[in-house]
Amino acid sequence: MSLLEQYEQQYAALIAEITAHIGRLQQNTTAERNELCTKIDASLSEAQELLEQMGLEVRELNPLQRSNFNNKIQVAQAELKRLQGEYKQTKDRLRSQANSFTTLDLAGSGDYYEDVAISNDQRQRLLENSERIERTGNRLNEGYRVAIETEALGAQVLNDLHHQRETLQGARARLRETNADLGRASRTLNSMMLRALREKVVLYGVGICFVVAVGVSLYLTFAPSSTAATS
């Protein structure tokens, strides 16, 4: 497992933990709420640091992987900002409820019905938080699936390019061999033409010599006979 994948898992666990703590804020006493707020603040800071570390690690990736992980980091950053806003709204609402409880205690009436309303509100908040956690997990899984598919597609493209490169290199090598064969054939043809030309010159020379020899022989044969006849 790569370092980025470890960061992703840690971040997902932190987001789930923060969401669960926010949902529990309305169910506990003031002291327990203060403890939960401390944990939530620490978890939010840790999640932000994880995103920064992921941003640094992404710079070491190739361009295709860097684009995919940058998109995932942007989604994670948006989710963290949403949780920070929800956490702030929850604390503000709790402060408002605490002020309302103080007013009701001074008035001394309506406690039972207010508790029922608070209980229903807590139940609704738990349901909303559970659905939000599920949606967050689904988005992270979908983003991871898209990243895997994109990585597989990039690997396939790289393999195709490598195969095409090998094909081009093979064609270039065959072209060089063909050029070398043509060069050897051209030299062989030139050599044959020169040899034929030399043989033709020799043949012509032999023919001329033969004709001259025949002529001289005829002359030497018939010339004395003509001279003797004249005498």
Image (cartoon, rainbow, N blue to C red):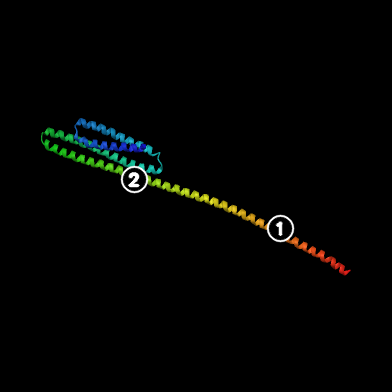
Q: Residues within 10 Å of mark 2 (few under 14, many from 20)?
A: some
Residue 175 falls left or right of residue 60:
right
Q: Quadrant of the N terminus?
A: top left
Q: How many marks?
A: 2
Closer to the observer: label 2 or label 1?
1
Residue 139: quarter of image: top left
Above or below, 207 against 128 in this view is below
Residue at the far left: name it: 109
Of 70 and 100, the residue lying toward us:
70
Question: Dot 1 lies on which element?
Answer: helix
- Marks 2 and 1 sit apart, C-alpha to C-alpha, by 83 Å
- The residue that label 1 is drawn on is 202
Query: Residue at 64% of width from left, 54% of height from top?
Result: 191
Above or below, 157 against 111 in this view is below
Question: Dot 2 lies on which element?
Answer: helix
Residue at the far top: name it: 31
Residue 146 is marked as 2
Q: Quadrant of the C terminus?
A: bottom right
Above or below, 108 against 202 in this view is above
